[in-house]
């Protein structure tokens, strides 16, 4: 599995820049994203894909961070040109967070494959955010 994640680290660094740095600024990314990505992986394994997406697309979760921004970054990693998620399936993932659950819930959507790629993206994100921003993450 580590070989599968190694190629995703550059994509994760780009996702951190594009989503979190763009939203919060380079020195103000909330530290909660480190633990939230761990929680994402655990939730995905225990609850499954659709319940996890339902939780992480909720903008008003009261979680201290914007979970939908984490999901946005993870989906950006999955859709990255270097990701091994098939191109025709990447095109089916909407860019709008509100439409993700609806699209993935369709019977013909490759849910198991997306679940595996999201788990890999979560590990790559966790490695990237720790090495990229360890000394800069904003403590609450």
Image (spheres, grey):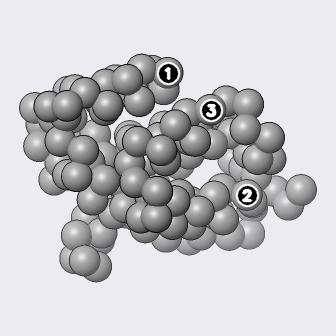
- Residue at 31% x, 32% y is 104
SS type, badge 3: loop
Q: Nearer the viewer, residue 120 or 22?
A: 120
- Disc 2 crowd, CA 10 A, few/some/many (<14, 14-19, 20+): some
SS type, badge 2: helix
Q: Nearer the viewer, residue 91 or 18?
A: 91
**Which label's residue is closer to the chain start, 1 or 2?**
2
Quadrant of the rendered structure where residue 111 is?
Answer: top left
- Residue at 48% x, 44% y is 51
Please, which residue is most extreme toward the right here? 140
Measured as percent of width and height from the top left, residue 41 is found at: 47, 63
Q: Which of the image's four quarters has the C terminus?
A: bottom right
Of circles 2 and 3, the one toward us is: 3
- Where does label 3 land, which residue? 58
Q: Which of the image's four quarters has the N terminus?
A: bottom left
Establish if 64 lies above or below 40: above
Q: Is residue 50 left or right of residue 32?
A: left
The numbered disc on residue 98 is 1
- Residue at 68% x, 69% y is 134
SS type, badge 1: helix
Look at the numbered discs 1 and 2 and tell me whether their residues touch, using CB distance below 8 Å.
no
Of circles 1 and 2, the one toward us is: 1
Q: Is residue 47 left or right of residue 49?
A: right
């Amino acid at each position: 599995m580590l070989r599968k994640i190694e190629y995703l680290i550059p994509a994760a660094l780009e996702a951190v820049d594009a989503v979190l740095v763009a939203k919060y600024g380079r020195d103000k990314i909330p530290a909660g994203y480190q633990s939230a990505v761990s929680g994402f992986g655990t939730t995905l394994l225990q609850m499954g894909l659709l319940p996890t997406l339902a939780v992480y697309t909720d903008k008003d979760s009261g979680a201290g961070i914007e979970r939908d921004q984490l999901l946005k970054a993870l989906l950006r990693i999955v859709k990255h040109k270097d990701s091994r998620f098939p191109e025709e399936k990447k095109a089916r993932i909407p860019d709008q967070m509100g439409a993700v659950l609806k699209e993935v819930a369709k019977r013909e959507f490759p849910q198991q494959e997306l679940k595996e790629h999201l788990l890999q993206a979560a590990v790559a994100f966790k490695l990237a955010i720790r090495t990229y921003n360890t000394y800069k993450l904003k403590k609450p």
